[in-house]
Image (spheres, rainbow, N blue to C red):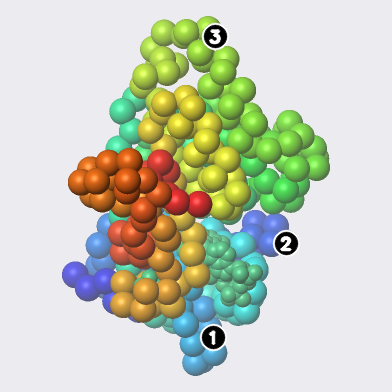
Amino acid sequence: MSKFFTCEIVGNSGQNANFKLLTLQPASQIIAPKPGQFYMIQTGTACDPLLKRPFSIYNFEQNHLSFLYRIRGKGTLSLSQLREGDVLQVIGPLGNSYPEPDGDFIAVAGGIGIASLLPLIRKYRQRAYLFYGAMNTGDLVMLEETRELAKEIFITTDDGSDGQKGWITHAVKDFLGELKIANQPSPRRKGALSIYACGPVPMLKALSEITRAAGLPCYASMEEHMACGIGACLGCVVKIADKRASLQRGAEAAGQFIYKRVCKEGPIFNIEDIVW
Ligand SMILES: Cc1cc2nc3c(=O)[nH]c(=O)nc-3n(C[C@H](O)[C@H](O)[C@H](O)COP(=O)(O)OP(=O)(O)OC[C@H]3O[C@@H](n4cnc5c(N)ncnc54)[C@H](O)[C@@H]3O)c2cc1C
Ligand code: FES
């Protein structure tokens, strides 16, 4: 089965003023995506915008693909204006996927980062402690579905219009601190928890400090601008600690890094390895 295919739009509905859910029906049978993978999607029916844009798989059911997207610029605005019956070129599934959680897990979503994490939360129903942060109540989407799927949900908004006022990373830190004090038995046992995260870079950077201090594994999905999405243009690289140099030369190699492509080796990286 090819990763290059044509789809017909069967839904492109607004969740609120800024977010839409796009549902595509591929013209042929396609490869099933894994949680955390993404697709490059044509955003207009003419040649403009020329470049496809990357979107995480939100749902895959009965050979239909769904994507939750936020209207940000030219590409997503153009996509939001397309209608049922329009036909788009799509490439995917691309990139790696979230490693399988061992028992319960923590998912940390910043804004539209929820789109990447929901397939994982859906696949492992009632096993996620979901931490969902947004700027305000209008930026929180799919709350009904999320509440059904997650084991527990913690919400923060920057302006306090929903949930706790403040940053989601503070809520994660408090939660991990409470676990430590309570030394709770399974399933909340600290040792059983992996952390999965998708959101803006400042959120991921703050989270990396928290998870390092807590000694917990954390996998972060990185979002970079992408031109090709298939590893050819090197436009999407991030700095990753050079473990091989550290093994060979020890402390002398501390701080050395290599570049990895978000579209090919990512988008999911061990958060400890990312050089901010
Ligand atoms: C692997 C991956 C998965 C993604 N999944 C989703 C998703 O499920 N839903 C969703 O809404 N968005 C997702 N994005 C982001 C989405 O691709 C961008 O919002 C989109 O490409 C913007 O295109 P545009 O033409 O509308 O905006 P542009 O006009 O290109 O840019 C508008 C603004 O958005 C910023 N921007 C553009 N692309 C990115 C990016 N990749 N990361 C951070 N900032 C960016 C620009 O700097 C600018 O400020 C994902 C990105 C990646 C790399
Ligand atoms: S987008 Fe071209 S190499 Fe990643």
Q: Amino acid at mark 3?
A: Ile
Give me the residue at 54% from left, 89% from top: 48
On screen, residue 109 above or below 91: above
Disc 2 under 8 Å from ligand 1? The reply is: no
Q: Answer yes or no: disc 1 within 8 Å of ligand 1.
A: yes
Q: Nearer the viewer, mark 2 or mark 1?
A: 1
Looking at marks 2 and 1 on the same chain, the residue that comes earlier in the sequence is marked by 2
- The reply to whether residue 189 is visible in this rendering is yes
Residue receiving disc 2: 17
Quadrant position of residue 246: top left
Q: Residue furthest front?
A: 252
Image point 24% across, 46% down: which residue? Answer: 249
Question: Which disc is residue 49 wearing?
Answer: 1
Residue 266 lies left or right of residue 202; in this view the side is left
Q: Are marks 2 and 1 in contact (CB under 8 Å)?
A: no
State left or right for residue 254 relative to residue 181. Answer: left
Which class describes the residues within 10 Å of circle 1: few (<14), some (14-19), or many (20+)?
A: some
Q: In terms of secondary structure, where does tag 3 sit? A: helix
Crowd rating for badge 3 (residues with CA inside 10 Å; few <14, some 14–19, many 20+): few
Question: Can you give x and y, in whole percent of width and height, for residue 98 in the image?
Answer: 35, 45
Query: What SS does tag 2 mark?
Result: loop
Q: Is residue 23 in sight in this rendering?
A: no
Q: Of circles 3 and 1, which is in front?
A: 3
Question: Residue flagged by tag 1: what amino acid is it?
Answer: Pro
Marking on residue 181: 3
* Ligand 1 quadrant in view: bottom right
Q: In front of the other: label 3 or label 2? A: 3
Q: CA distance from mark 2 to mark 1?
A: 22 Å
Above or below residue 252? Residue 29 is below
Q: Amino acid at mark 2?
A: Ala
Report which quarter residue 66 is drawn in.
bottom left
